[in-house]
Amino acid sequence: MSDNVNIEQLKRWRLILGQGVNDKLNDMANGQELLDSELSLMDQALAAIYDDTNGDISDSRSHSGGRSASLGASSPRLANWLGDIRSFFPSDIVSVIQGDAIERKGLTQLLFEPETLRQIKPDIRMVATLIALKGRIPEQTKETARLLVREVVDEIMAKLAHEIRRSVTGSLNRRKHSPLPSLTGMDWKKTIHKNLKHYNRENKKLIPERFYFYERARRSKEWTVILDIDQSGSMADSVIYASIIGSIFASLPALDTHVIAFDTEVVDLSEQCANDPVDMLFGIQLGGGTDINKSVKYCEQFISDPKKSLFILISDLYEGGNQAGLIRRMENMRQSGVSVICLLALSDGGVPSYDVDLAKKLSNLGIPCFGCTPDRLPELIAGALQGRDLLELASAITTISK
């Protein structure tokens, strides 16, 4: 291995391990200084979050090679730090570092200063933080916070809205047939099946006597879809995705959509959902206890035609209320003909912490309990509306074992 390669490796280890190994690694480099001015700035930006120090970032730049930085309590220092990490790291890494800054260093108060908030790279973790702290956001910062949340909401909507709408309308269009002669709407499978008796063996051709087409004009509110969302802090990403998806459902005339959020109390967000998903998100209160049974009881009132109702419980199943009552309600709902699903997580990845015992009990009743990434949700909704076996459907798309 060449000396140049060794030096480059030592530089990387110096950035990873911090100031505490500076002398030892310099000795291994035969006294060669490992960090030039640019790498020193990168080191200080990382030290502000990942070193257990009490220094100040304004002081850190005056000490060559010293890694005694923190963000302190000053908006200008935080603004400088945000500029540094954006210049040194790609956008996905910036989001991780910003999240760590909030979680490890308690910088939430600084986020409420408009000049700082404008420099934040918005992502779903930052939205969760702002929603959790919405009661403490000063008036002069509220509009900036809403713009940041809206940017993330619009990005998620752009990724999911088309596929969800196509899945819903496509699934419902395949449940009835119409005599209208439209080639694009032809049900080829049914047409072939119904006309097999007209197969001409001599010419080896199928000569249909009748054609079957999917119905395109659907009446309003054909299905009821209920999203029952656990607001506990561990479900933050799932809450945000579920709320936005609920607003997509609400835009579809074929669906009667209800979005319910709960902790120990129940909040009906259906009206906000239909109007503005950002308003809906700011109506959510992350954290608190959990009474799933109470929420499911509230949702039962919306089910008028069980066989055309889809109930999606989004929860880690840590029930603080009546677990026996919850199981009984979920079983009765399923037996009545409702399509019942429990999503332990609706997020981009990661295995959630959830009540394994309760998940098994519900699964044994024919209610699938699993995790799902947002990009697989259109497939899940389409399968449920088409009447597919939910346990088989869950097995096909699950990202987290039951």
Image (tube, helix red, strand yellow):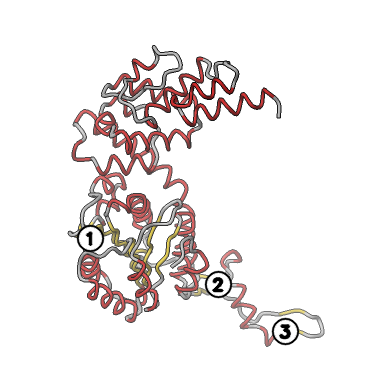
Q: Residue at x 61, y 83 (%)?
A: 194
Residue type indicated by callout 3: Tyr
Q: CA distance from mark 1 to mark 2?
A: 47 Å
Type of the residue with mark 2? Phe
Query: Could you say whether the residue bearing mark 1 is in a helix, strand or loop?
Result: loop
Amino acid under label 1?
Thr
Q: Residue furthest top?
A: 62
Is label 2 in a helix, a strand or a loop?
strand
Quadrant of the drawing holding the N terminus: top right
Q: Nearer the viewer, residue 213 or 254?
A: 254
Figure quadrant of residue 165: bottom left
Categorize mark 1 by other alpha carbons within 10 Å: few (<14), some (14-19), many (20+).
many
Residue picked out by circle 2: 213
Disc 1 target residue: 290
Q: Between residues 175 and 259, which one lies in front from this camera angle?
A: 259
| Image position of 162 with respect to 133: above or below | below
Residue 365, given in percent of the width and then of the height, sits at 37, 79
- Disc 3 marks which residue? 199
Residue drawn at x 48%, y 26% as measured from the top left: 21
